Each structure stands twice: as C-alpha cells, then as structure tokens.
Amino acid sequence: MNKTRVDIIIPVFNDAEGISRCLASLDTQSKGGCQLGVIVVDNGSSPPVKIQKSYAFPVTMIHCDTPGSYAARNAGAAQSEADVLVFLDADCTPEKDWLINGLQAVLAEEGDWVIGGEVIYMLSNDPTATEAYQCIVGFGQEKNINIRGFTATANLFVRRELFLRVGDFDEALLSGGDREWCWRAERAGATVGFEKSAIVSTPPRRKLRSAIIQARRIAGGRYTLLSADRRQNLNVKRVLPERSTLQKLKIIWSGDEFGSVMRLKVLGVAVLLLTVRKLEVVRLKFGGGRERR
C-alpha cells in the first residue's frame, strides 16, 4: 500500500456543512503510507461551495454543471491519475480506519474487484418519525452487495484501471447509477465485495419533505432502469425492492427500538412514501421530469 496513489472523489450539492464535516473526518484518517488526494466536485450548488481551510492532504475543487451526482463523479474521475479511486458522499463521516481498511480490501485480492464498505445511519438524540423509518429499514449495503451485486457510491473503492475499463457512470440516471455501473463491472469480469470494517456513517433524512424528494428520486431511477431499452441488460429482480410493502410494515411494527406511538408514526411515514413512489411512476409515465436531489 506504500506510495499507492489514492483519490477520494466527493460530489456535493448545496451541502457546505456536510462537506466540511466530511473533510474534517478525512483529516484524521489512517493512511497506511498511501499518497492521498481529495477531489471535491461542486454539482451546481447555490451559492457555490468553497473550501475554507487546509488539510493534511491536497484538496482539488472542480465544478460540474451537468445535473446529477453521477455526472459529478465522472468529472472527478476524469481529473484523477491515481491508482485507486474512492467514491464518498459529502454527508458521510468515515471512521478513522475506513480508508486503510477499504484500500487493503481492494488491493489484497487477485483479479478485478469493486469494494463497498459499510454504511450506517447516525440517529439523532431526538429522532423524528422520518429518521426512525430510515433507521428501521436500514441502508442495506451488505445485502445490496451480497444479494443484488452492487455497492452504493457512498462508499466505493475501485482501481482506476478497472474504472476506466468499465467506463463512466451513466449520467442519464439521477438514481441507480451505482447499480448500473456495478452490474456493468460484473459483466466485464469484476467481483463486487463487501468490507465490513470500512465504515462510514451518514445522517438519515430528518424531515418528511426531504424523504419524499429522496423517494421520488429513487422511484425515478428504478423507472429509468426498467425502461424498455434497458431491461434486456438487467436482472429485473435486482432492480425491484427486496422486501414487499407488507414485509416492511411488519419489520417496522415488530421492532423494539422505539415505542408503540413512534412505531405508529413510522408506519404512517412508510405508507406515505409508498404512495409517493407509486405516484411518481405515474407522473413519469406522463412525461414528468425526474427529481435530482
């Protein structure tokens, strides 16, 4: 790992606080002798994001005007000449050994590997029903990797040579681009693996409005992936939700982390978000534009 060149690519959109926390957490990382750089890609923030302080690693700030985090990640990757690319979200806070554990995983294996680290939700001291819903349902990184064959770009390690061979993320997707890229990597002979010790935490959506926007974006991504011109290259079961609505409701009600009043509120959030996703598909079928945030 000594002298391995590593670039962490972080897209950011209207989240100056998040990127500041993220960079501060990277400042304390165990680096294992690697040559670390960070590329922050402002994806059209208003006002533009600025890096206000210096860190123990060089930070390159670039701008990408094409809407969507996958376009921003492509712009960051195009800027890099590192041996390993690491994709991280601006609202994520890596644990101290996140980087070295992820690098060891992606560099130790023979053959072509894409490594996804663990992503956990940070519950606030006074959680809303929306936060509780997301924490109960979970981020699902390990299951996504082991069952669905993809890692979220919130925590993804890959050799740059493999990334170039597989090609850029699909910029037409505003959600689900991580799935599509990983499945393309699989078809190119790569293996997607899970590294439990490479941990980042991220806050769940606290406000219902924010969760609704997220639900619309995810529904739009699935709708695009399942469109007629894409279905032939996909395992459709990997695109559809792993759990049925009834299964999700049972998980919410049977959980013991929250009291019965909160669980009732969480059930309400779950039903509302299900309705939002269904309506979003109808809206898209009638030519509506996709949600990007």
Image (cartoon, rainbow, N blue to C red):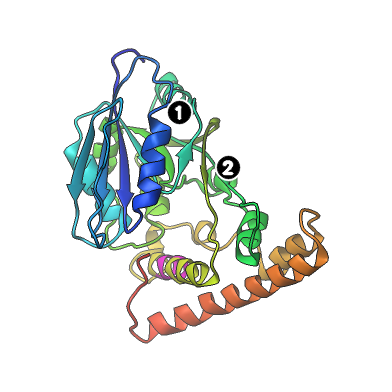
Instruction: Describe residue 247's horizontal placement relative to residue 233 as left or right.
Output: right
The residue type indicated by label 1 comes to: Gly
Q: Which residue of the protein is positioned furthest toward the front in this rendering?
A: 52
Please rate how many residues cluster around mark 1, counting C-alpha atoms within 10 Å: few if below 14, some from 14 to 19, many from 20. many
Location of residue 189 in the rendering, given as x and y in whole percent from the top left corner? 38, 36
Residue 113 in view, yes or no? no
Q: Main secondary structure of the magenta part?
A: helix
Q: Nearer the viewer, residue 152 or 261?
A: 261
Residue at image position (75%, 66%) is: 263
What's drawn in magenta, residue-wise? 218-223
Alpha carbon distance from label 1 to label 2: 14 Å
Q: Nearer the viewer, residue 286 or 130?
A: 130
Residue tagged 1 = 102
The residue type indicated by label 2 comes to: Glu
Q: Would you place residue 151 above or below residue 287 in this image?
A: above
Q: Along the polypeptide, which appears first: circle 1 or circle 2?
A: 1
Location of residue 75 in the rendering, given as x and y in whole percent from the top left corner? 21, 47
Instruction: Describe residue 51's horizontal placement relative to residue 230 as left or right.
Output: left
Q: Which residue of the protein is positioned furthest toward the bottom in this rendering?
A: 286
Residue tagged 2 = 142
Please rate how many residues cluster around mark 2, counting C-alpha atoms within 10 Å: few if below 14, some from 14 to 19, many from 20. many
Q: Nearer the viewer, mark 1 or mark 2?
A: 1
Q: Quadrant of residue 197?
A: top right
Instruction: Report if residue 71 lies within the magenta region.
Output: no
Q: Nearer the viewer, residue 222 or 274?
A: 274
Location of residue 10 in the rendering, given as x and y in whole percent from the top left corner? 32, 44
Q: Quadrant of residue 167?
A: top left
Q: Marks 1 and 2: CB-CB under 8 Å? A: no
Q: Secondary structure at mark 1?
A: helix
Instruction: Describe residue 234's horizontal placement relative to residue 201 as left or right.
Output: left
Q: Secondary structure at mark 2?
A: helix
Location of residue 196 in the rendering, given as x and y in whole percent from the top left corner? 57, 32
